[in-house]
């Protein structure tokens, strides 16, 4: 029985599962793209990965420093959500499916957008339980233990409907490591992030009160997802680094010509809008921050706002039209009118 009491016939999904050991963000990006290509052909992928060093994990829509380099210190995920630490002391996982409801139905829209995470996160919860960590998914973009965030979870749906679910799991470091990492890679303070002070987040080691090996975490996660998906996992050599990894990282950077800015607090952190306007008409518009939405939806919204009259009614009509599409959604910001409010703050700025 699915969410809301609706019975679903779970489709058969061919799954490939593997682990990438000690990979850089550029190789992870290449693997993400290969997984999406496989999903378009009907094949699902479950992957765990470890990254060396200190790595700041940006969501899909965060601004990065204009001089950001693909040297491993910054990683832009496929999915949205907030900024978290990664690298040593963390394990990344990704589940790539042909469509957002593939774990429940052959109908891509059988699950509402807000139900998708609940399905995808179950393997993570089972893996943590096998390690002895009584974790919960209270909603939004975190998995918690003892009421403290332990893992980030998020997802994206691309233009072909492919679902990319991602998690960054704290093994023996936690989100309080983010501040020091940002000091090294974002000296100009471009990245907007919510910082967790010591004691405000936890890890698997913290929840257990003892050391835990990353390999043990990987094994537990692989077994948990394998049990749900019906597959076996093994190590796999990482693909060659994506040639455009630096361009991907710099996909959203500060642009001086977008001289008006508005922001709104949200359930996940913040939504920022940077834009230009002249003669009562919007020019370029860029949305950024802690939001979970299909990248094509955000691109369509930014394009639709270009040339829109800088008036609330006109902006509201554009936003309503874009989000009327069945594939469109945005999570983590509250009602979509938050976007309208933030655009108008930027216009006034």
Image (cartoon, rainbow, N blue to C red):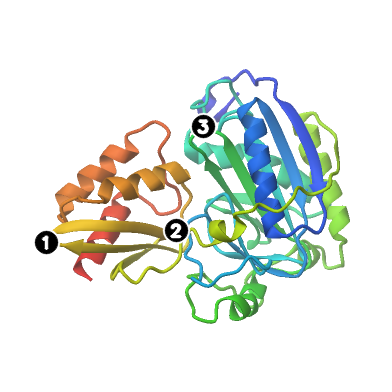
Is tag 3's residue or tag 2's residue first in the polypeptide sequence?
3
Residue 96 appears at what percent x and percent y? 65, 38
Q: Which mark is residue 160?
A: 3
Name above or below for residue 36 compared with residue 8: below
> In the rendered image, which residue does mark 1 sit on?
279
Residue 29 appears at what percent x and percent y? 65, 51
Is tag 2's residue or tag 1's residue first in the polypeptide sequence?
2
Q: Considering the numbered disc 1 on the image, is that residue within a helix, a strand or a loop?
A: loop
Q: Considering the numbered disc 3 on the image, is that residue within a helix, a strand or a loop?
A: loop
Residue name at image x 49 percent, y 58 percent: 251
Of 209 and 38, the residue lying toward us: 38
Is tag 1's residue or tag 3's residue first in the polypeptide sequence?
3
Name above or below for residue 209 compared with residue 245: below
* Quarter of the image where the N terminus is located: top right
Q: Is residue 14 left or right of residue 78?
A: right
Residue name at image x 30 percent, y 68 percent: 257
> What is the quadrant of residue 256 in the picture?
bottom left
Q: Nearer the viewer, mark 3 or mark 2?
A: 3
Of 331 and 318, the residue lying toward us: 318
Q: Which mark is residue 267?
A: 2
Of 259 and 83, the residue lying toward us: 259
Residue 37 appears at what percent x and percent y? 63, 34
Residue 316 appears at what percent x and percent y? 22, 47
Does the image show residue 135?
no
């Amino acid at each position: 029985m699915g969410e809301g009491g609706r019975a679903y016939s779970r489709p058969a999904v061919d799954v490939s599962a593997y682990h990438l050991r000690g990979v850089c963000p550029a190789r992870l990006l290449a693997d993400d793209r290969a997984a999406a290509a496989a999903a378009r052909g009907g094949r699902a992928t479950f992957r765990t990965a470890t990254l060396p060093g200190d790595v700041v994990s940006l969501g899909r829509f965060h601004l990065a420093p204009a001089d950001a380099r693909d040297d491993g210190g910054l990683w832009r995920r496929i999915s949205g959500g907030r900024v978290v630490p990664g690298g040593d002391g963390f394990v990344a996982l990704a589940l790539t499916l042909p469509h957002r409801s593939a774990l429940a139905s052959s109908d891509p829209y059988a699950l509402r957008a807000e139900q998708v995470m609940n399905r995808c996160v179950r393997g993570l919860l089972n893996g943590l339980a096998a390690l002895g960590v009584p974790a919960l998914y209270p909603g939004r973009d975190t998995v918690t233990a003892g009421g403290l965030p332990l893992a980030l979870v998020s997802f994206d749906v691309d233009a072909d409907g492919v679902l990319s679910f991602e998690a960054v799991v704290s093994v023996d470091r936690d989100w309080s490591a983010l501040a020091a990492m940002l000091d090294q890679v974002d000296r100009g303070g471009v990245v907007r992030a919510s910082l967790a002070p010591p004691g405000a987040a936890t890890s698997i080691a913290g929840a257990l009160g003892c050391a835990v090996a990353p390999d043990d975490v990987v094994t537990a996660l692989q077994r948990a997802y394998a049990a749900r998906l019906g597959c076996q996992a093994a190590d796999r050599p990482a693909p060659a680094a994506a040639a455009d990894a630096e361009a991907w990282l710099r996909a959203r950077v500060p642009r001086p010509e977008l001289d008006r800015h508005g922001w709104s607090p949200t359930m996940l952190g913040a939504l920022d809008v940077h834009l230009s306007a002249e003669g009562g008409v919007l020019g370029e518009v860029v949305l950024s921050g802690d939001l979970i939405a299909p990248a094509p939806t955000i691109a369509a919204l930014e394009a639709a706002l270009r040339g829109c009259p800088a008036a609330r009614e006109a902006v509201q009509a554009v936003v309503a039209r874009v989000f009327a599409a069945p594939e469109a959604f945005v999570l983590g910001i509250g009602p979509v009118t938050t976007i309208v409010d933030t655009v108008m703050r930027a216009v006034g700025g």
